[in-house]
Image: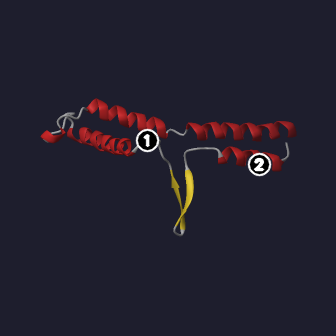
Amino acid sequence: MTDTNKLQAIREHIQNLSGLREEPFGNRTRKTVGFEVLDQADLTNSIAALLEVCYYALDGHGSFVEPKHSHKMPIASVTKVIEMVIDLLPHDQMYGLDKITEILADGASKKA
């Protein structure tokens, strides 16, 4: 495989990766990551779960003091946050890096 072919193969793998994205933002490039949500309510619930877990961690008792939040269960919030963290793990990027390593190793083994 020629160097040009290797670069083309690497570009194809990189273009198909999810995870870290670059986009123009004013006079700089912004890097973002994301996770899938079902709808606006799921997005709101995800943000609320993050805040609730922070509250539980700071409170130390695992329950809200305010009566309007007394129905919230720590286990539900913690579970939601764990799911979000799992969704943010860069599995696709690691797969892509493995493919790039294979492409580069293929060329190196042929040169040796």
Left-right relation of 52 to 38 = left
Sort mark 2 into few (<14), some (14-19) or many (20+) by Cα contacts within 10 Å.
few
Q: Which residue is mark 1?
A: 37
Mark on residue 51?
none
- Residue 77 visible in the shown view: yes
The kind of secondary structure element at disc 2 is helix
Residue 59: quarter of image: top left
The correct choice, above or below, for 25 with respect to 67 in the image is below
Identify the residue at image location x=37%, y=41%: 42
Left-right relation of 70 to 54 = left
Identify the residue at image location x=57%, y=56%: 22
Quadrant position of the C terminus in the picture:
top right
Left-right relation of 102 to 109 = left
Residue type marked 1: Val
Residue in the foreground of this view, choosing between 38 and 90: 38
Residue type marked 2: Gln
Q: Which residue is mark 2?
A: 8
Quadrant position of the N terminus in the picture:
top right
Residue 73: quarter of image: top left
Residue in the foreground of this view, choosing between 109 and 99: 99
In this view, which residue lies farthest toward the top?
75
Residue in the foreground of this view, choosing between 73 and 96: 73
